[in-house]
Image: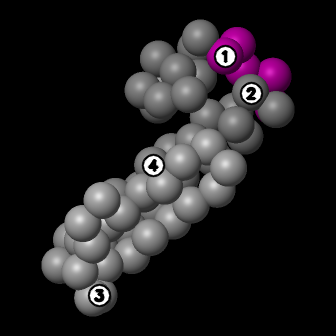
């Protein structure tokens, strides 16, 4: 595994993800968008929306 100074490393017992420093802002922005969508799906399901319908509405599980 090759890393450079300024890279970001995220790890847990399941694996490691290395994000090149020059891509970190774009990767974090996209991750935040996906988390927001997942939260909308979760909220809809908790409010009684069928999970398949929630998926069709937001495009994510």
The residue nearer to you, when weighing 8 against 39, is 8
Tag 4 or tag 2, which sits nearer the N-term?
4
On residue 5, which mark appears? none
**Residue for badge 4:** 34
Which x, y percent locates residue 26? 25, 68
Location of residue 6 by image quarter: bottom left
CB contact under 8 Å: marks 1 and 2: yes
Give the crowd class for mark 4: few <14, some 14-19, many >=20 residues within 10 Å: some
Depicted 43 relative to depicted 33: above or below: above
Q: Residues within 10 Å of mark 2 (few under 14, many from 20)?
A: some
Q: Which residue is mark 1?
A: 51
Residue at x 62% of width, y 43% of height:
14
Would you name the residue on which mark 2 appears? 45
Residues tagged 4 and 1 counted as in contact (Cβ below 8 A): no
Considering the numbered disc 3 on the image, is that residue within a helix, a strand or a loop?
loop
Examine the structure image and report whether residue 29 is included in the region drawn in magenta: no
């Amino acid at each position: 595994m090759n890393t450079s100074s300024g890279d970001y490393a995220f790890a847990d017992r399941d694996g490691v993800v290395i994000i090149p420093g020059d891509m970190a802002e774009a990767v974090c922005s996209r991750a935040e968008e996906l988390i927001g969508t997942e939260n909308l799906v979760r909220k809809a399901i908790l409010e009684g929306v069928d999970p398949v319908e929630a998926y069709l509405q937001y495009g994510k599980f």
